[in-house]
Image (cartoon, grey):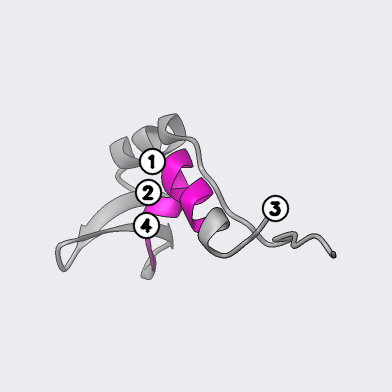
């Protein structure tokens, strides 16, 4: 059987997110409409999903989606 590999996977260590939360300019972590977001450039906001920073959530999602390697 063929292996399933996610070749476009993102994960960020929590220590980097902590550093981004302390920044006052992009890139940084901000709260927007009650949700934590990554601001990569002024006005460019992307949701900070749990599987981006939590190893447990990332592995659970990979298991659920039958992804063997990311």
Residue visible at 15% across and 63% down in the picture: 34
Instruction: Count neighbours of disc 4 (C-alpha within 10 A) and say few if under 14, some if 14 to 19, many if 20 or more.
Output: some
The numbered dot on residue 20 is 1
Image position of 64 (left or right of 35): right
Residue visible at 56% across and 56% down in the picture: 62
Gap in angstroms between the C-alphas marked 4 and 1: 12 Å
| The N terminus, quarter of image | bottom right
Query: First in sequence: mark 3 or mark 1?
Result: 1
Location of residue 10 in the rendering, given as x and y in whole percent from the top left corner: 58, 54
Image position of 20 (left or right of 24): right
From the image, tell me which residue sits under label 2. Answer: 28
Q: Are marks 4 and 1 in contact (CB under 8 Å)?
A: no
Gap in angstroms between the C-alphas marked 3 and 1: 30 Å
Q: Are marks 2 and 1 in contact (CB under 8 Å)?
A: yes
Q: Residue furthest left?
A: 34
Above or below, comparing residue 21 to residue 35 in the picture: above
Query: First in sequence: mark 4 or mark 1?
Result: 1
Query: First in sequence: mark 3 or mark 2?
Result: 2
From the image, tell me which residue sits under label 3. Answer: 68
Location of residue 20 in the rendering, given as x and y in whole percent from the top left corner: 38, 40
Determine if the magenta segment contains residue 50: yes
Instruction: Count neighbours of disc 3 (C-alpha within 10 A) and say few if under 14, some if 14 to 19, many if 20 or more.
Output: few
């Amino acid at each position: 059987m063929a292996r399933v590999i996610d070749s476009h996977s993102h994960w960020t260590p929590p220590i980097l997110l902590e550093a981004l939360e302390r920044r006052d300019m992009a890139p940084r972590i901000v709260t927007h409409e009650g949700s934590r977001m990554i601001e990569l450039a002024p006005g460019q906001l992307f949701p900070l999903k749990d599987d981006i920073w939590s190893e447990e959530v990332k592995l659970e999602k990979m298991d659920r989606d039958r992804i063997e390697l990311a």
